[in-house]
Image (cartoon, helix red, strand yellow):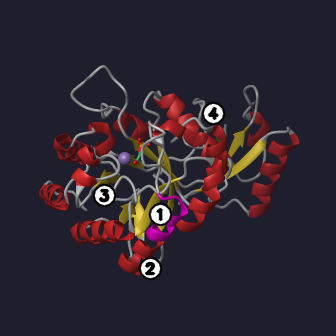
Amino acid sequence: MLIVMHKEATSSDLDAVIKRIEDHGWEAKPIPGGERTAIGVLRNKGPVDPAMFLDLPGVRDVIPVSKPYKLVSREMRPEDTVITLGEGEGSVEIGGNRLVLMAGPCAVESENQAIEIAHAVKESGAKLFRGGAFKPRSSPYSFQGLGEKGLEILAKVREETGLYIVTEATDHEVCDLVEDYTDIIQIGTRNMQNYRLLRRAGQASKPVLLKRGMWATMDEFLMAAEYIMSEGNNQVLLCERGIRTFTRHSRNTLDVNAIPYMRKESHLPVVVDPSHAAGRRDQVIPLARAAAAMGVHALILEVHTHPEKALSDGPQSLYPEQFQELVDGLRAMNINV
Ligand code: PEP
Ligand code: MN
């Protein structure tokens, strides 16, 4: 249920609505918008009678929200959410008209490796540097990431290049550390339904890039985002990174249908990761172009200066020249990069 206030509603009008919601044992969630303030009603067990609120001063409308996810839903917030990193001239908006590029290696391997790749991707137009310090690997014998040392390297990358950082928190315990160092906290595909981590990220002061579980339906994905938002963090980015299908010609299948679906169902910015969808370098640029043509807000891509020596995901990592080629191609498509 969404209670939409008149533009002229006063703060005491708002307080009265919130009080009435709370008197019923429900949760009130004010959602400020450009044009109007709305108040979401959460944690109600059954339907809520709109008449309960229509008599209060300042209330313009009461709209039932039909979806299981509320805060994530476009019914709750018709306008797109824009997430801003930094302030002033160097700030970056994700969710607006510009396609934001996030690029870097799968894993931070050393300071030299990270700095070298960061300079290259920045040169081509990336605004964020990606790189895992804590890596969720299928094999316990594979490189697990540099841990806190990797986060320190990421902080150096930001200092030296001015790129913002996105890096993964693999569980709620490392989330504290990751939150301290990063600009965006990434939650990986394998953790999409790690509810303890989702709640912890919901209490964070940084935006969260939530990757879709490789097995997850859209409802499950959007409900995972709802977990984060229900803890008070409104800054969530929805990332499609490919789902498991029967194909053998790619690591995963980029679910392009999900892009217009997410744009319609949710106000949150949509990000696509063509690297993990493809799993192989030769498919990354075409998938990135397709996603950009469909109007996603950001792309997250793996780029490595020596992918043949990469400690993880080398086969899907673009060479810096290919990343530049991708950016040139997007500009030729009139995409505002
Ligand atoms: C990654 O971004 O390197 C990663 C592990 O992604 P995913 O969780 O989508 O597999
Ligand atoms: Mn990877």
The residue tagged with tag 3: helix, strand or loop?
Answer: loop
* Quadrant assignment for the N terminus: top right
Give the spatial CA distance, label 3 vs label 4.
33 Å
Location of mark 2 (residue): 88
Between marks 1 and 3 in the image, the one whose residue lies nearer the viewer:
1
Q: Residue 233: x percent and y percent?
A: 62, 54
Q: Residue 168, relative to residue 243: is it above or below? A: below
Q: Residue 123, relative to residue 294: is it above or below? A: below
N-terminal label among 3 and 2: 2
Location of mark 1 (residue): 150
* Quadrant assignment for the C terminus: bottom left
Q: Residue at x 30, y 34 (%)?
A: 254
The dominant secondary structure in magenta is helix
N-terminal label among 1 and 2: 2
Give the spatial CA distance, label 4 vs label 1.
46 Å
Location of mark 4 (residue): 64
In this view, the residue in front, 152 or 118, is: 152
